[in-house]
Image (cartoon, rainbow, N blue to C red):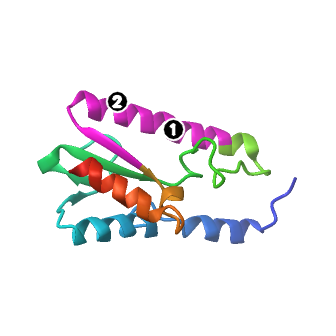
């Protein structure tokens, strides 16, 4: 099956996808800041370059996009119908890298919290943030 977009349009669309300071990430950061938490961002010295780092609590938060990180049984993780093999390979590499980073962080004594973007949708946002707050307390 051919792509519905031209190569130039697809390239442009993909170039607009950011790895840091995404809307879900900003939502969590603003919430945490309003609750009085202070943190570091995207610490390149730690495995996986975590989105949010709490050195004081030895805790790390990853905010994962359901598609990019292959969130199992999630309605937002839909395997593309074009270049399926390439996409599955990319997502599986992302998942393997996530697991490797989490294992290394836990081994180093860090507590790791993963927030999926589906948990930040309107219908589940309050619950997700409440659970996050309890995990940090």
* Residue at the spot 18% in from the left edge and 62% down from the top edge: 37
Task: Work out whether 12 lies above or below 106.
Answer: below
Q: Is disc 2 surrounded by few (<14), some (14 to 19) or many (20+) residues within 10 Å?
A: some
Please name whichever residue, 3 or 128, is drawn nearer the observer in this view of the structure.
128
Residue marked by disc 2: 103
Report the side of 133 relative to 90 (left or right): left
Describe the element under mark 2 as helix, strand or loop: helix
Residue 101 horizontal/vertical position (percent): 36, 36
* Residue 51 makes an appearance in the image: no
Q: Is 105 above or below relative to 12?
A: above
Q: Is residue 110 magenta?
A: yes
Q: Which residues are magenta?
A: 88-114
Q: Name the disc covering residue 95, or none.
A: 1
Mark 1 is surrounded, within 10 Å at the Cα level, by few (under 14), some (14 to 19) or many (20 or more) other residues, namely: some
Q: Secondary structure at mark 1?
A: helix
Residue at the location (71% across, 48% down)? 79
Residue most extreme to the top: 107
Lateral position of residue 98 relative to residue 60, left or right:
right
Dominant secondary structure of the residues highlighted in magenta in the image: helix
**Comes first in the chain, label 1 or label 2:** 1
């Amino acid at each position: 099956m051919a792509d519905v977009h031209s190569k130039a349009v697809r390239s442009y669309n993909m170039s607009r996808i950011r790895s840091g300071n995404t809307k879900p990430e900003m939502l969590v950061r603003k919430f945490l800041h309003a609750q009085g938490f202070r943190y570091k961002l995207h610490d390149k010295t730690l495995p996986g370059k975590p989105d949010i780092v709490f050195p004081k609590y030895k805790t790390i938060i990853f905010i994962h996009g359901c598609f990019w990180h292959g969130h199992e049984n999630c309605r937002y993780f839909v395997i593309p119908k074009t270049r399926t093999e390439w996409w599955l390979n990319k997502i599986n590499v992302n998942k393997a890298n996530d697991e490797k980073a989490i294992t290394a962080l836990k081994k180093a004594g860090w507590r790791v919290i993963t927030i999926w973007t589906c948990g930040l949708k309107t219908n589940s946002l309050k619950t997700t943030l409440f659970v996050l707050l309890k995990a940090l307390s």
